[in-house]
Image: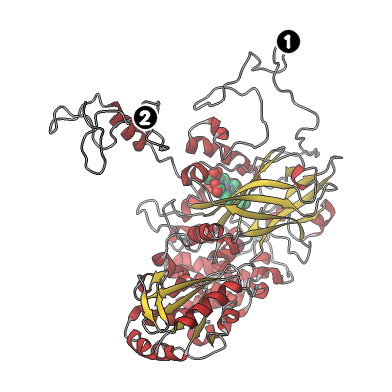
Amino acid sequence: MAKPYDSMTGEGGDTQQIGRGDTPVMTTNHGTPISDNQNSLKAGARGPTLLEDFILREKIFHFDHERIPERIVHARGSVAHGYFECTDPIPDLSRASLFSEQGKRTEVIVRFSTVAGGAGSVDTPRDVRGFATKFYTDEGNWDLVGNNIPVFFIQDAIKFPDLIHSVKMEADRGFPQAASAHDTFWDFVSLMPESLHTVLWAMSDRGIPRSYRMMEGFGIHTFKLVNAEGQESFVKFHWRPRLGTQSLIWDESAKIQGADNDFHRRDLWEAIANGDYPEYDLAIQVFDQELAASLPYDVLDPTKIIPEEVVPLRVIGRMVLDRNPDNHFAENEQLAFLPSNVVPGIDFSDDPLLHGRLFSYLDTQKSRLGTTNFHQIPVNAPKCPYANMMRDGMMQTHVPKGRANYEPNSLAEAGEDGGPRPRQEGFRTASQPVEGEKLRVRPETFADHYSQPRMFWKSQTANEQAHIASAITFELSKVALQHVRLRVLSQLRNVDEELAERVAKGLALSLPDRAPAARDPVALEPSEALSIQKRWHATLEGRKVGILFAEGSEKAAVDRLISQIRDAGGTPFTIAPKVGGIALEGGKMEADGQLAGSPSWIFDAVAVVLSSEAAGKLAHDSAAVGFVMDAFAHLKAIGHDDGAKPLLDRAGIKADEGVTDLASLPKAATLRYWDREKKIRDLA
Ligand code: HDE
């Protein structure tokens, strides 16, 4: 008998090797045990491969079809499992079972995403981020498919394909990937003033979040809550990250694209793997028709927010993400969200954008996942029992018993299983009188496109305003069509003259005439909640500190810093010119990362612990000089010992509040140093 195949020597291989110890047997997809997974079947050792080789054919056939179409938008995303816990029940407002009792937990899966880039694109371009949550409630799945920005570019679903075509890579050239800084996007938005509010949010620091863990989420549309008596209220949903909202600096986010394509995905994965579970509060804004009617904008218009100073937020629960996916394909690519997935107690408003979404997501899953049975894929299936008379179809995995595939039936009377029946307490659409002519129009109440972007602009700090002005200037500098740049400026004049002037100056253009406004803007009070900097959480939790050392550094100082950072809830990451272990003053030490591959861009703050000899040497190493120079330019805290000075001097670091000794670093590292910005960058 021939010898079994040995993968080390490549010998043998024509006998079955079934069940060696606990290792499962490799089989074909139909269960036939495989003896050799290295060699295809040939006629003679150097002869032609045989068509008969069903093992080879099945393996290549399956591989050829491993990819499914990526999502047309939000193609790149990262998922995490966890739970939602109700902390403040609201049975008076909604009969949704997940909000019924204090402490009640509901399993969730969340997918965070960018919008414009493909599945293999990077994590930190300027873009809106998706924040989609599937709650596996005991009365069915509720999908809250939101974004990190509380408004959207368009008011009516019929404009969505145009918006997305314009922002994606241009149709003829296939670039730019994952970027809005190009002709077609700005052409479209300059012709659609309703998009300006969201454009301003996207051009603000919200468009470049530091982490999915430090990002707010918004359901955007007005929804309805319905209680057991059938009484309705309007509601807007908000996720608030416990770590606070934090963003990157534009130059930093652009550089991170080179250092770590997976910056956000890795951050989420590592936080969960380390037990630092991301947490968010779920808050609601609840209001009635009377309040809605009193506002100078329409609550059905998804380009508008209701400031929390007008309708306060009430926290009703928290979400904890405590489990990484086991398999990217099964739990991310195959995950299907449907805004139409609601449960009894939650209902839709008449927002025309929402209504288009109720169709689109169901439809797109058929083309992405290939079958109407996509709900049976484990990550999509409800965790509660589900039953109906829908049958068959591609990739049907259920095996229903009996004859009852129609309803009503009387089979139970003959002792057979008659199957499920609708019940009174099931989902009931909130009843509302509807009357009107069939019209293709936009309501008058949707016509003010400028008051809210102006309110957003006025709510920002000076630095944040500078970031918005320079982001628009940057994007328009990538626009080649002069008439498009001018049209954007003519729109911006309606938002704020100063903003328009700053952008015009940045582009060396004269201001064109103001665009005609469909309706004159009204003055709205600025809202503090719209600024990230005004609500900054000064904490080291969730933040990562890079510690650079080299031969001769004081080991005790590095060790001390590591434990101080950990004690404050941060994550230390050590960096050295060589990773394998180098001699420090006081012992040998391995580093987590090599200097050339660990630029300061990927940390929230840095420490430099060096002997003066090593610092003198590193002052001639561009990676080391860049490490501190960029940390300074990105407004980060820099902690250092005396020995590190030659390197800091070479990098032109000027002492300020954020440049500290090592002992003060853990506290200093909780902030960014906004005051520094005007000294190193033109904020005009
Ligand atoms: Fe989406 N959107 N969308 N969208 N959207 C999709 O559904 C669509 C909109 C959002 O992680 C697609 O399964 C239309 C607003 C997120 O899997 C598609 C309109 C908001 C995700 C689709 C909108 C979103 C999507 C593509 C205008 C914030 C990622 C793949 C009427 C409230 C979900 C898919 C995930 C995904 C259509 C507007 C958020 C094509 C037609 C507004 C977070 O169905």
Quadrant including the N terminus: top left
**Would you say the residues marked 1 and 2 are in contact, meaning their CB atoms lie under 8 Å apart?**
no
Q: Answer above or below: position of 91 versus 580.
A: above
Mark 1 or mark 2: which comes first in sequence?
A: 2
Q: Which residue is mark 1?
A: 415
| Residue 574 position in % (x across, y down) | 45, 73
Mark 1 element type: loop
Query: Circle 2: is it few (<14), some (14-19), or many (20+) Cα within 10 Å?
Result: some
Q: Tell me where residue 416 appears, x and y as whole percent.
A: 70, 12
Does 431 appear above or below 168?
above
**Residue beneath label 2, please?**
28
Q: Which quarter of the figure has residue 12?
A: top left
* Dot label at residue 336: none
User: With 499 as the anchor, is 42 left or right in this view?
Assistant: left
Q: Front-most of 77 and 218?
A: 77
- Percent x, y of residue 661: 53, 88
Please state which of the two labelled residues, at mark 1 or mark 2, is closer to the viewer.
Answer: 2
In this rendering, position of residue 560 left or right of residue 320: left
